[in-house]
Image: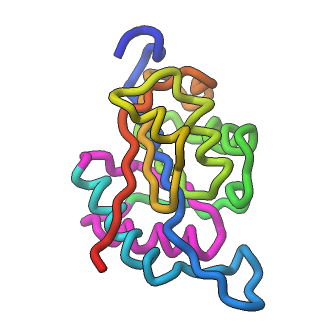
Amino acid sequence: MNARYGTGPLRRLVVLRHAKSAWPDGVPDHDRPLAPRGRRDAPAAGIALADADCLPDLALCSTAVRARQTWELASAQWGTPPPVNHDPRLYAADVPDLLSVVHNVSAEVETLLLIGHNPGLEELVLALAGDSLDDALERVRVKFPTSAIAILAWYGTSWRGLAPGGALLTSMMVPRGKK
């Protein structure tokens, strides 16, 4: 990467949309659990992050049940999961809210995992990515489905320096579990 993406240590923001959720009758949106497909796909997301050598130093997760379950199933695929903060601000968050949360992460964290919801996550990826490798940015523009993972890289001395257009989208993947 070049100076366009900042100076300082390499930082990676890993954006994971929760896995496929169920729609049980009478259950409030915040309390919806994962569907069977989501219970298969969430571990596949964890495996994909390990295979990409992109395990986080810290995870920030929405308090919604489906996001928490995605975190639990994905992180169970790693030897030692990192600390996780379940943050109510991530539920139904828009780009300014998401950036506010990210900007307050400790500078010691080099790889941050953000687990949440659309449309906010998709819009965050599109706002932050100044460019992408391969066709990753176009793929996000087309669809950022459940279990999608976007990896954004940039150089910076703190998370406060992450700004719209300031990161390179290095990867976009949609891991799926086996039926």
Between residue 42 and residue 56, name the one nearer to us: 42
Horizontal side of 57 relative to 77 (left or right) equals: right
Query: In percent of the image, x 49 and y 54: which residue is there?
Result: 16
Q: Position of residue 17 (x, y in %)?
A: 53, 57
- Compared to residue 48, the image places residue 96 above or below, namely above
Between residue 23 and residue 48, name the one nearer to us: 23
The image quadrant of residue 95 is top right
Name the outermost residue toward the bottom.
25
Which contiguous range is marked in magenta? Answer: 52-81
Q: Position of residue 78 (x, y in %)?
A: 28, 64
- Compared to residue 13, the image places residue 19 above or below, namely below
Horizontal side of 52 relative to 41 (left or right) equals: left
Give the quadrant of the N terminus. top left
Q: Position of residue 129 (x, y in %)?
A: 52, 28
The image quadrant of residue 132 is top left
Query: In percent of the image, x 44 and y 73: which residue is there?
Result: 72
